[in-house]
Structure formats: C-alpha cells, structure tokens
Amino acid sequence: MSSLANRPSDRLIAILDVVLLVAAGIAVLAPVAWMVLSSFKESYEVTAYPPTIFFSPTLDNYRSLSETTPFLQFGINSLIVTIGSTALGILLGAPAAFVVSWTRITWPAIVTLLARMAPGTLFLLPWYVMFRQVDMIGTYGALILTHAVITMPIVIWVLLPFFDNIPRSVFEAAQVDGCSPVRIFWRIALPLVVSGLAVSSILAFVFSWNYFLFALVLSNSDTKTLIAASFNFIGEGSTNWGGLMAAATLIALPPLALALVVQRWLISGLTLGAVKG
Amino acid sequence: MASIRMQNLVKKYGDFTAIPGLDLEIADHEFVVLVGPSGCGKSTLLRVLAGLEAIDGGELFIGERQVNAVPPARRDIAMVFQDYALYPHMTVRQNMAFALEMRGMKRDDIAGRVEHAARLLDIGAYLDRRPKALSGGQRQRVAMGRAIVRDPQVFLFDEPLSNLDAKLRAQVRTEIKALSQKLRTTMVFVTHDQIEAMTMADRIVVMKSGVIQQVGTPEEVYETPANQFVASFIGSPSMNFMEVTGAGDQLALSDGHRLPGTTDLARRVPAQGSAILGVRPEHLAVVPADEAALMANVDLVEPLGSDTLVHFKVAGTNTIARVEPDRRPRPGDVMPLAPVPGKAHLFEAASGEVIR
C-alpha cells in the first residue's frame, strides 16, 4: 500500500484533491462568511468598494432588527409554517413511500417529484384564487398546505430507499403473524426507518423554512414568515444591507444548527439509495 | 394439527406458469420435504400454502377448510424464512410474542408460551437481546421459536438451513427433526439439498418446473426413482448414466462394449432401441476380474475417509464408483467393477421414465 501511495502520480492526485476541496469549501463558505461579517458592519461599509476587511464590529443591525420589526413574531410564524408543513409532509409522505415500496408502483412518487420540480409560480395563481374563495389567504393553514407540496416529495424520496432496504420477508413474516398492511407500516416498517424519518424531516424543515414565494403571496402581516419579511429590507430607492444581512444570518441559523446536529445521519441517509445492493 | 390437500393447484406470474396444476395430499403430523433445483417451484408452492401468493386455479385445503382466499394470518400456519425475517427492532422475546399480541392473547399466557418455547430451543439466555446480537444459528432458533409459540396447525420452512455453515446445518437439521417428533405438527420443508430431504422427511416430493416428479418415502425415491431426473437428483454423488442397447442377453454400451451379467436388464430394453442405464456410485462393486461388467481405467481418486470415490470413463462418459476406504487405487490402475444385482435402473432414452 505504502509503495502505491508514494507513487508521484498518486501524490499529485492527493494534492489535487486537497486543492479542489479547499476551492469548493471557499466557494460554498465565502458568501456565508460575507453575510455574517456584513451583518456586523454599518450599511455603507457593506457596499464599500474595495470591501473593508478590517472594521469595528457593531450590533446595530441586530438591535434595529428587533426594534423596528416584529422579528420574533416572524420567527414564530416561520416555525409554525415549517413545523406544520414538515409534520404534514411526514404524515402523508411516509405512508405514501411505504406503499410505493410495498407495491413497487412508482408513478405516484414520480408525480409528486414532478410537482416539486415544477416552478412554484405554476401553482401560485390557482392557489391564490382557491384560498381567496375559502377565505384562507393570510392563514397559517394556507401556508402549511402549500408548503406540504415542498415537504411531501422530499419525505417520499428520502424514505423510499429506507423502506426498500427492509427485507421483504420481514413484511411477509408480519403478514403471517397477523398484521394488516396498516399495522405492518406502523409496528414494523416505521420503527425500522427512524433514521430516514430524521433525515427527511430535517430536509423538509430546511426546504420549507427557506421557501420564499408562497409565503410572500399567501401570507399577511400577521402570518409573514422570516424569509418573506426579510424582503422588506430591499427598498425601491435604497436597500438596508446591514439589516438584510443580520436578518439573513438569523434566518440561516436554525437549519444550519439542525444540519450540524444530525450531519452523520444526513450523510448516511442521503447515500443509502446509492449504495443499496 | 391438520392435513393439507392441493387439487389441480395453478400459480401463474403473468404469462409464466410456475405451477401448471398440482395435486398433493399431506397427512396430519406428516413431515414432507419439497425438494428440487432452483426454479422448480418448491418455494412458490410453499408461499402459496402460506397465503403470500394468490392461487390462480384449483383448490387448497388446510384441514377441512378451503383456504384459497384466506389471508396468511387466518390460515393458522407458521413460517420460518430463509433469512429468518426476524424483526430487527425487537428483542428475541418481543419477536416471539408478536404474533400472540396480534391475536390479542393475555400477557401472562404470552409470557408462558415464550418461556416454554425458549426452554425447548435453549434460547432462554438470549430473550432480551436484539437479533443483530445473535449468531446465525441462534437467529435460526429464534425464528423457529417464533413459529412454535403460535402452536400452529402447519409449520412451513423455506430453506431455513441454507444460511448456516455445514457443521451447524447438520446440527440444526437434527434438532428440527427431533422437534418435529416432539411437536407432532404437520410440517412442510423446502430445500434444494437432497441430504436434508433424505434425513428429515417422512415423504419427499421431488419437483421440476412446477411439476411433481415423484412422491415417496426417502427409501422409495432412492431405491425406485420414477424417472431419470429423480434418479440424478437424489443421491450424492449423482447416479451414473450410460446409454445402452440390448445385445442378445446382455446390455451393450454405445461403443459396443458388452456388459456381462446384465441379462435381466437387457430383457427390458426395447427391441431395436436404446435406453439409459443408471447405477449409483455405491452400487458399483469391485469384483473378481472374471465377473466384471466393466474394466475401469482409473482417472482420479478422492479419499473421503469413510469411503473412496473412484473416477473413470465409460464410453467417454465420466463415471464414479464408491469403494471401501482401504481400497486406494492409483490413476492408471484398472479396476474390475459390476453393478450390484438388483440395484441398476433402466430409463427410457426419450422420456427419461423408468423401465420396470
């Protein structure tokens, strides 16, 4: 092994690996670092050219955020919509994934994926009309239902390989033991895909938390989510860059913290379908 | 306890007919082994019995009840799967208790049955472990325990020994046989291993392409195979086959060599036709040169300890003789051999059916 690793071409590949990883890391982290640093700058410093690297940090942006906007309320709105739509996505998506895996009929799952891949604007107008008809514009219900279109396909497609990975004989043994399909799902299948549930919940949470369009149109001032509210910092004449960066930093925190906590599950969950024999 | 009756049973997968119409009766308390090569329909038949596959034609009775449309849970059967199919998230105790819980049995009764089965199978020490903490043999026992606690009318086994190593397989085989004698429950056991079939079965059902080739006791299928397929499948090493013709009062091989002492067999060969002579390796005896039907030029010798396998060619076909362990010919030696009287078989060349 050591003689192989010492070959010049291998060493070159190892160096290239490091260079590429560092480049990819910079590409991903630079905007995040820029956002976080800018949130501690005065607004004029954010757009200064050349960018100021050394500056005296200030918490003014965060202070004005809490003083001039109902930021906490927006945060609570975001949590309600995100947790609600994630729960709804799990409630509908987990049984759906199980049925797709059980019956091997995949077209319904593909339909939900297509719905997820279609641009949100496609749904927006019909939904706006529909929700206005039933007087639901500006309600949490409308936002949770629409965000379930984001969360449900994620849950289905993340859970599918987890269900596929359970030997079929386990389900058959449960059948012989007297389980109905509903009981097999509840007592056998679901406990065996707990890590998949965690992964899909987190992904659904992140996607729903970050989704901007539906909340922008279907919410009102009482139910506006953080991501839609942050749009207010972009004015017609001028933009409060410092405030925007502070808001963006705070908005990014919950999904980031979640991802860090469950990163091991996340990676194994996302690669499960790929390595299944 | 119950008998099983299949009448003209048909199972199809789309255009493919896996079982084209099968009749079989299994008596109460009987241990029946379904045996055959991969794809012969034995596992399909077991799954049909379990209710895991729908029946496309014919009738299936367990006891006096027709169960064609009865779901698995209400057939009062228990099944041991090839990969054991234990519930990974439950302890051994929970695995064994699960079916009883589903029936709504009282906790005390469940605990009693689980303890009893655990004692029977000697798995009491593992009751609170999860399946992944057990060895293959222990998992196999738990799978049997899960079946036993249900006290079913019929036990179904789908190649339950195939994942075990050779030593453990022999041990568990004996244990299952002993268990069947203790429980006196009807058992249907699927295997591709003819040794398992021979050692465990009250009756063996030999299958090929979804069709039963022969049903009989292990002695019957070994001593009087119904056709060339059964003859080749049962017995290890496999039966030797040679194409022969009748030449007066003797059989003659395809190369013209005559086999002395085969008068009885020669009478059964169709006139002007050929047949297949079948002789098991253990039924080729070493005889004095003047009584030999064959003079075998030894190619290869395999000493097994208990006996020795001698490989040679007869009219260009590989042939094996099983001889005493102390007889150790060398490659190139010539051995005078003759079929043991009454132990050779003749089969029709075209159909493979036995000629009696």
Image (tube, grey):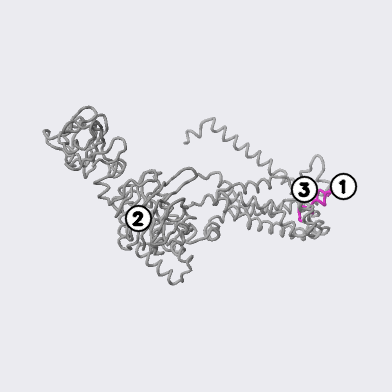
Residue type highlighted by circle 1: Glu
Mark 1 residue crowding within 10 angstroms, few (<14) / some (14–19) / many (20+): few
Q: Closer to the camera, A113 or A77? A: A113
Quadrant of residue A16 within the rendered picture = top right
Would you place residue B153 above or below residue A20 in this image? below
Q: Closer to the camera, B120 or A53? A: B120
| 1 vs 3, front mark | 1
Q: Which residue is mark 2?
A: B25
Q: Kindly identify which chain the residue marked by label 1 belongs to.
A: A
Q: Closer to the camera, B86 or B280? A: B280
Asked if one can make out residue B155 in the rendered structure from this viewpoint, the answer is yes
Mark 3 residue crowding within 10 angstroms, few (<14) / some (14–19) / many (20+): many
3D distance between C-alphas at marks 3 and 2: 83 Å
Residue furthest top as drawn: B255
Q: Kindly identify which chain the residue marked by label 3 belongs to.
A: A
Residue type highlighted by circle 3: Ser
Asked if one can make out residue A58 in the rendered structure from this viewpoint, the answer is no
Q: Kindly identify which chain the residue marked by label 2 belongs to.
A: B
Q: Position of residue B356 (x, y in %)?
A: 23, 42
Would you place residue B266 above or below residue A31 in this image? above
Q: Which residue is mark 1?
A: A236
Q: Is residue A112 left or right of residue B124?
A: right
Q: Which residue is mark 3?
A: A38
3D distance between C-alphas at marks 1 and 3: 21 Å
Location of the N terminus of chain B (image quadrant): bottom left
3D distance between C-alphas at marks 1 and 2: 87 Å
Q: Is residue B356 left or right of residue B158?
A: left
Give, as a single range, the part of the protein colored magenta. Answer: A225-242
